[in-house]
Image (spheres, rainbow, N blue to C red):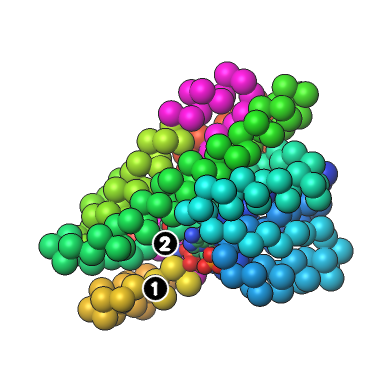
Amino acid sequence: TYPALAGRTAVVTGAASGMGAATARLLAASGARVALLARRTERLEQLAAEITAAGGQALAVTVDVTDRAAVDAAAERVHAAYGPADLVVANAGVMLPNPLTAGREDEWSRMVDTNLTGALRTVRAFTPDLLAAAAAGRSADLVTVSSIAAHVVFPDYAVYGATKAALTHLAASLRTELGPRDVRVTNIEPGLTDTELAAHIDNPELAEQLGGMFAAIPALTSEDVADLIGYTVSRRRELNLRQVVALPTRQA
Ligand code: NDP
C-alpha cells in the first residue's frame, strides 16, 4: 500500500474486473476513498462491499463510458458522495481483434467509443475537479491506461492498437495542457496481463493464439499494474513518471 494516498478521492473506470478492480483495492487499502465505475453493477457492489468490509471506503457507480450523459451523471454521484475527485484512473477498455478485412465496424466503433472517446468523456467530466485540487495546493492525478499496443504492431489488432496509440498521444497532449497547472498526467502502458480482457474476443483462432501467448509467457498480474499506478501517483507532486511501459520479462 501507499500511505501517501490516504485521504485522496479517487475515481477508477473499468473497476469491475482486472486492473481497475486491483487498482481500486490498492487505493482503498492505502486510505483513499474510491468511486468504482463500470457497467456491471453486481461486480461493483461486490467489490465495494469487500473494500468496506476491509475498513476502506468505496462507492459503486454504474456507468457506460460510451454514454456521455451517463458519465456526467456518474461525476455528479461522486461529487454528492465524496466531493471533487483528485485522482482519476481512466482504465476502461475493450479489445476486439479481427482482421481489418473482416470489416467489423461494430467492433471498431465499440473500441473507439470505449478506449478513446470513453477516456475523453471521463477526462471531461473530472478535469475541473483535478484543476481545483491542484489550484488548492493538493496532489491531482490523471492516469490513463494505454498499452504496449500503442507502440508495437500486431496483425489483427489494428483498431485496438490505433485506439491505444491515440490514447497515448492524447495523454501526452493533455499533459502539456494540465502539467503547467499542476495536474500530473501519467500514462501506463502494460504488456500481457492476466485479466478478463481476452474473454470478449469472438474470433476463435485469435482467442487461441492469445491463449498460446499466455501459456508461453508468464504474464503480469492486475496487482502488478495496480502497484505501478499506486507508485506513480504517490510520488511528490513535482515528480511525474509520465509514461511507464511495463512488460512481462519474456515479452518481446
Ligand atoms: P478487463 O476486461 O478485466 O477490464 C476492463 C474493464 O473495463 C472492466 O471493468 C469493464 O467492466 C470495463 N468496461 C468495459 N467497457 C466499458 C464501458 N463501455 N463503460 C464502462 N466500463 C467499461 O481487462 P483489463 O483489466 O485487462 O483492462 C483494463 C485496461 O487495460 C483496458 O483499457 C485494456 O485495454 C488495458 N490493457 C490490458 C492489457 C492486458 O493484457 N490485459 C494490456 C495492456 C492494456 P464492465 O464490463 O462491467 O463495464
Q: Horizontal and vertical percent for residue 13?
A: 58, 54
| Residue 200 - label | 1
Which residue is disc 2 drawn over?
94
Residue farthest toward the front in the current orientation of the protein = 69
| Residue 182 - label | none
Q: Is residue 157 visible?
A: no
**Mark 2 residue's CB less than 8 Å from ligand 1:** yes
Q: Is residue 41 left or right of residue 99?
A: right
Cβ–Cβ under 8 Å for marks 2 and 1: yes
Q: In this orientation, which residue lies closer to the viewer: 127 or 66?
A: 66
Query: At 64% across and 62% down in the image, what residue appears?
Result: 62
Decide: is 210 above or below 234.
below
Decide: is 47 above or below 90.
below
Q: Horizontal and vertical percent for residue 215?
A: 36, 78
Give the quadrant of residue 183: top right
Q: Which residues are magenta?
A: 173-195
Q: Is residue 194 left or right of residue 85?
A: left
- Give the residue type that dot 1 points to: His
Query: At 82% across and 60% down in the image, what residue appears?
Result: 56
Q: Is residue 126 left or right of residue 193?
A: right
Q: Horizontal and vertical percent for residue 111?
A: 36, 56
Is 236 one of the magenta-colored residues? Answer: no
Label 2 crowding class (10 Å Cα cut-off): few <14, some 14-19, many 20+? many
Q: Quadrant of the C terminus?
A: bottom left
Is 187 one of the magenta-colored residues? Answer: yes
- Give the residue type that dot 2 points to: Val
Mark 2–mark 1 distance (CA, rounded to whole Å): 8 Å
Q: Quadrant of the N terminus?
A: bottom right
Query: At 71% across and 62% down in the image, what residue appears?
Result: 60
Q: Helix, strand or loop at disc 2? A: loop
